[in-house]
Image (spheres, rainbow, N blue to C red):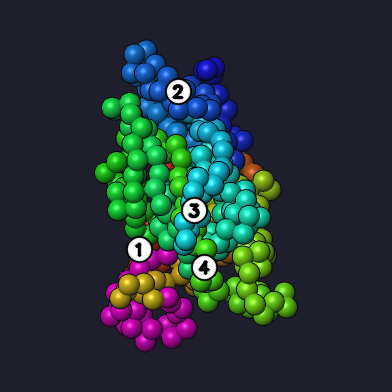
Amino acid sequence: MLIFENHPLLTLNSFAIDAKAKYFTSIQSIDEIAEVVKKNKKDLNEQLLFLGGGSNLLFTKDFNGWVIKNDLKGIELIKEDENYFYVKAMAGENWHQFVMYCVDHNYAGVENLSLIPGNIGASPMQNIGAYGVEIKDVFCELEAYNIEDQQLVTFNKSDCEFGYRDSVFKTRLKNKFIITSVCFQLPKRPKYNTKYGAIEKELELMNISTPTIQAISNAVIQIRQSKLPDPLKIGNAGSFFKNPVISQAKFDALKLTFPNIPSFPNNHLVKVPAGWLIEQCGWKGYRKKDAGCYTLQALVLVNYGKATGAEIVELSQEIIESVKDKFGIELEREVNIF
């Protein structure tokens, strides 16, 4: 295991922020995770940051600690029964490549989550979701390394305490475990979800009347590519804010003033698209130096080249304040700030 000092992180975060790590290494096995944890306790005693695809974080300064790149690899069908395929993926696998693996093998359940940036390890941590599907809908279990006890632990669905873009790994167990693998429970008799967003319309444009796993995946990819910037070309982390969830009473009151406000039901509450709220406040397409709000999707903040993390955070705060002033709704950042 090689340890590098003052290591550049520019190519390891999708916002393309030019930050450095005090120490950096890549791990490719559980044994190497154990080695890192033991060495840090014995010799370095640094703050640890386990990095996956770098797609849900924003560096505002150099990281004064040890960045460990999770490069655990492997995807396999570990079992199947009458109702499900059980597919295990290691945490360092790219999420979209995993979805393509499932599509190619005719495993349903994750096709709506095509082209989401990031790696497998972050998927349960964030409870990633799109177009009416979340990780919790297809989750079976995961394995994670306990940093304190230095043991591998299995978490079932209830253990993970999934919420909207949330899990126990972002709350009371934050920074206490390293996710090493995730097992997904994929239905053999799927119920395709095409009602959310523009999937049905896209399928019509593709002249597809009977949805399939491949068709839905292709539709989602087309939709995402049409409105979201490619991180390889424009630095971004996808959706920067969570879609706020409000009470029915609050939504009804807002609808009197803003009759065109869109919404989606959410367990007796109402989810309002953050992108719409931001756009109504005039931020869509806004740019100050190299920090901006993307021209095709207001939910996405971007780095057009040389923006600093601090400049992007400042822009996000201005957006939060303007949405609160106009709608009385306080947006919450989905991206982790360092």
Q: Do the residues labelled 3 and 2 touch (CB within 8 Å)?
A: no
Q: Nearer the viewer, mark 3 or mark 1?
A: 3
Q: Quadrant of residue 265?
A: bottom left
Please tell me which residue lies in front, 154 or 196. 154
Where residue 257 sits, quadrant-wise, is bottom left
Q: Does the magenta stretch include residue 194?
A: no
In the picture, measured across the screen, residue 305 lies left or right of residue 188, that is right
Label 3 to label 4: alpha-carbon separation: 13 Å
Q: What residue type is labelled 1?
A: Glu
Instruction: Say which residue label 4 marks.
Output: 189
The region drawn magenta spans 240-264
Mark 4 or 2, which is nearer the eye? 4
Q: Distance between the residues labelled 3 and 2?
A: 29 Å
Three-letter code for the amino acid on which mark 2 is drawn: Asp
Question: Which residue is drawn at the image coordinates 38% and 37% (left, top)?
Answer: 144
Question: For the residues marked 1 and 2, what is the alpha-carbon distance in whole angstroms?
Answer: 43 Å
Real-space CA distance between mark 1 and mark 4, rounded to the nearest whole angstrom: 40 Å
The residue lying toward the viewer, choosing from 327 and 179, is: 179
Figure check: 242 above or below 171: below
Q: Which of 272/28 is in front?
A: 28
